[in-house]
Image: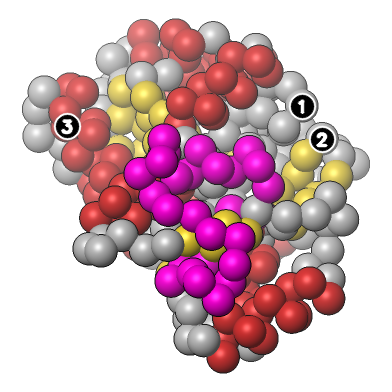
C-alpha cells in the first residue's frame, strides 16, 4: 500500500495481522537490529520468520553486510539462527562482487577494511593491491582499525592521495553505524561520507540504492517460479535511512523496528520493548525523509 507523508502509521505488538490474508509473497528482512544484535539472535524474530514461511511467504535476509552471503550464513548459524527461518541471504557484499565482475577491464582494488571483508573479492577473480598508487578503485568494507573513529590520521593521508589521483571509492556497506550489543560502532558508510566530503567520488551498493531491490525482486521470482511485483514484497528493518527509505523509493511496503538503530533518537534506549511516542516518530520520519507502513518495537509474531 502506498503511504503518503502525514498519513498515520500503524503500530502493533506483532506482525501477524499485517502479513495475513496473503497480502505479501515475500519479505526482505534486515539482520542487524532486527534478527540479531551482533551478539545473539532475538527469539521473536526466529518465531516470526518461521511463521511467515509457514504461510508461504518467501523470506530473503537482506543485509548491508560487506561480505559474501555464504559467510553471513555461517555467522547466523553461529549466533543460533536456524537455516529453516529463511530462503536466501543477499548482502551488499554480493552486489559489490557482482558489480566488480561486470566491469571491463576489471579494476585493481585497494581494500579499505579488515581481513574478514576479503570475501568481497571472491576466490581471486578480483585483483588487489596494497599500493594506493597502483589502484584503480578503493573498495571500503569497514574501518580497518579496532579504534572506532573516523578521524584517524591514516584516513586523511590516504584520502588526500586518492583524491589527487581521482580514484573513485566503492562503498560496500552504506550503513553509517550499527549497534553491536550495547555499543554503537561506525560502518563503511561513515568513511565513504568522509571521502565524499573531501571531494572524492563515491558509489554505494546495497540499501537504500535501487540495484539491490531489483536484484532481490528477480531472486524472489526465481525462487517462487512466478512473477513478483514490488507491491508483493514487504521490507522489515531498523534503519530509516536505509531500510525504510529504500523501500519507499522502490515502491515496497515497510516495517520499522524501533529497538534497533534509532532507539536513542526515539527515546526508547532504556525501555526498548515500549513503542516510541508518536510525536517522536513523526519527527524522525520527517528528519530522515522516510515513512514506514507499520511500527513494531521488536520483530515478533
SS of the residue at dot 1? loop
Circle 3 crowding by C-alpha within 10 Å: few under 14, some 14–19, many from 20: some
In the rendered image, which residue does mark 1 sit on?
Answer: 39
Q: Quadrant of residue 103?
A: bottom left
Circle 2 crowding by C-alpha within 10 Å: few under 14, some 14–19, many from 20: few
Q: Nearer the viewer, residue 42 or 133?
A: 133
Is there any visible trace of residue 179 in the rendered image? Answer: yes
The C terminus: image quadrant: top right
Q: Is residue 122 above or below residue 82?
A: below
Kindly identify the residue that appears in the image at 24 percent across and 55 percent down: 102
SS of the residue at dot 2? loop
- Measured as percent of width and height from the top left, residue 266 is found at 75, 55
Q: Is residue 212 above or below residue 297?
A: below
In the rendered image, which residue does mark 2 sit on?
Answer: 181
- Tell me which segment is drawn in magenta: 114-142
Q: Nearer the viewer, residue 60 or 20?
A: 60
Circle 1 crowding by C-alpha within 10 Å: few under 14, some 14–19, many from 20: some
Marking on residue 221: 3
What whole-number distance in Å separates the C-alpha atoms at marks 1 and 3? 33 Å
Q: In the image, is 294 to the left or to the right of 267?
A: left
Q: Quadrant of residue 283?
A: bottom right
Is there any visible trace of residue 237 in the rendered image? Answer: no
Tell me which label, 2 or 3, sits earlier in the chain: 2
Q: Which mark is in front, 1 or 3?
A: 1
What whole-number distance in Å separates the C-alpha atoms at marks 1 and 2? 6 Å
Kindly identify the residue that appears in the image at 33 percent across and 13 percent down: 55
Marking on residue 93: none
State yes or no: discs 1 and 2 in contact (Cβ < 8 Å): yes
Q: In the image, is 39 to the left or to the right of 224?
A: right
Tell me which label, 1 or 2, sits earlier in the chain: 1
Tell me which label, 1 or 3, sits earlier in the chain: 1
Q: Quadrant of residue 163?
A: bottom right
Amino acid at each position: 500500500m502506498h503511504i503518503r507523508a502525514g498519513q498515520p502509521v500503524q503500530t502493533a505488538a506483532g506482525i501477524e495481522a499485517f502479513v495475513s490474508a496473503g497480502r505479501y509473497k515475500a519479505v526482505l528482512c534486515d539482520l542487524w537490529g532486527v534478527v540479531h544484535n551482533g551478539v545473539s539472535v532475538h527469539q521473536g524474530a526466529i518465531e516470526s520468520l518461521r511463521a511467515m514461511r509457514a504461510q508461504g511467504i518467501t523470506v530473503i535476509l537482506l543485509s548491508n553486510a560487506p561480505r559474501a552471503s555464504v559467510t553471513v550464513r555461517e555467522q547466523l548459524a553461529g549466533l543460533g539462527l536456524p537455516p529453516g527461518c529463511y530462503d536466501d541471504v543477499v548482502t551488499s557484499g554480493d552486489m559489490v562482487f557482482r558489480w566488480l565482475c561486470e566491469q571491463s577491464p576489471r579494476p585493481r582494488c585497494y581494500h579499505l577494511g579488515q581481513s574478514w571483508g576479503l570475501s568481497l573479492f571472491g576466490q581471486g577473480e578480483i585483483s588487489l593491491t596494497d599500493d594506493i598508487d597502483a589502484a584503480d578503485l578503493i573498495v571500503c568494507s569497514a574501518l580497518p582499525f579496532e579504534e572506532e573513529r573516523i578521524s584517524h590520521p591514516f584516513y586523511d593521508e590516504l584520502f588526500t592521495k586518492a583524491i589527487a589521483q581521482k580514484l573513485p571509492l566503492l562503498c560496500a556497506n552504506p550503513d553509517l553505524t550499527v549497534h553491536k550489543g550495547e555499543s554503537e560502532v561506525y560502518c563503511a558508510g561513515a568513511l565513504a561520507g568522509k571521502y565524499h566530503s573531501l571531494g572524492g567520488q563515491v558509489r554505494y551498493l546495497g540499501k537504500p540504492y535501487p540495484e539491490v531491490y531489483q536484484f532481490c525482486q528477480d531472486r524472489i521470482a526465481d525462487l517462487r517460479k512466478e512473477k513478483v511485483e514490488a507491491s508483493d514484497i514487504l521490507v522489515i528493518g531498523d534503519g530509516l535511512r536505509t531500510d525504510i527509505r529504500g523501500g519507499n523509493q522502490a515502491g515496497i511496503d515497510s516495517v520499522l523496528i524501533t529497538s534497533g538503530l534509532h532507539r536513542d533518537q526515539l527515546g526508547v534506549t532504556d525501555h526498548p520493548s515500549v513503542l516510541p511516542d508518536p510525536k517522536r516518530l513523526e519527527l524522525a520520519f520527517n528528519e530522515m525523509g522516510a515513512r514506514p507502513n507499520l511500527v513494531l518495537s521488536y520483530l515478533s509474531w
